[in-house]
Amino acid sequence: MSTATEDVDLVGEEIAANVARAALFAALTGVFAYVSFQLPVTSVPFTLQVLGVFLAGVFLGPVWGAASMVIYVVAGAVGAPVFAYGSAGLGSLFGQWGGYLWSYPFAAAVVGAGVHGAGDLVDPGSVSIGRLVGSMTVGTLVIYAFGTLGYAVVGDVTLVTAVLAAAVPFVPAEAIKAAATVAIVRSDAVVAR
C-alpha cells in the first residue's frame, strides 16, 4: 500500500532567500565595524558600518534592507561582538554612540525606498547616480539625526555641540562610503538578481 505525501514548505523559497541575504548584509556590517579607529577631534569612532547600511538598502530594498539592520542590531544587543571595536550588548545601544546603531534600520529603509521606490525592486545598476547619491544622503541625515540626538542626550551636551562632535567630522567619510557604494553598484562584478 502506498501513501501519498505532500511537501509542505514552512517558508517559501523567496522569503528564505531574502532572510539569507539580510543575514549576509548584517554580517557584512558587523565585519565593517571592525574597521574602527578614533579620530582626534571626537569621541565617536570612525567605522565602515554605514557602508553596510548603504549596501543593504541599495541591494535589498527598504523592507529587507531594514530587516538586515534589525538582525545586525539584535545580534549585537544579545552579545555578538559586531559593534565598533568588537563591542556588544545593551550598553552599546544605550551608550553615547547608541543613536547611530538605532538609526541603521531606518536609514537602510530610507536608502532602499529612495533607490527602489514603492514598487518591486529594481536593478540598482540601472538607477541614476544622482538617485543613488540622493538616497544615501537622506540615509546619512537619518543616521546623523539619531546619532547626534543620542550623543546629546547621553553625553548631556547641547545639540550644537553634538552636531559638531558627532556629525560634522564624519561628512567626508560618509561621502567616500557613498562613492564606494556607487562604485560597487556600477561594478561589473556585482550582478543584482
Image (cartoon, rainbow, N blue to C red):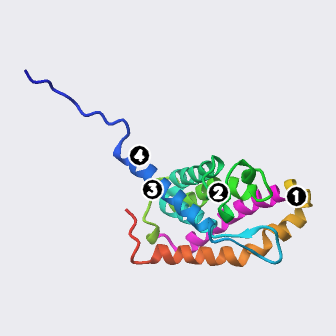
Label 2 environment density (alpha carbons within 10 Å; few <14, some 14–19, many ≥20): many
Label 4 environment density (alpha carbons within 10 Å; few <14, some 14–19, many ≥20): few
Q: Do the residues labelled 1 and 4 touch (CB within 8 Å)?
A: no
- Residue 21 circle label: 3
Which comes sooner in the sequence, label 3 or label 2?
Answer: 3
Q: In this view, does 51 lie to the left or right of 169?
A: left
- Residue 3 circle label: none
Which element is circle 4 on? helix
Which element is circle 3 on? helix
Image coords of residue 105 (percent x, y): 62, 53
According to the picture, the residue beneath numbered tag 2 turns out to be 104
Q: Do the residues labelled 3 and 2 touch (CB within 8 Å)?
A: no
Which comes sooner in the sequence, label 1 or label 3?
Answer: 3
Q: Residue at x 92, y 61 (%)?
A: 158
The answer to if 128 sits in the magenta stretch is: yes
Decide: is 161 above or below 103: below
Q: What residue type is labelled 3?
A: Arg
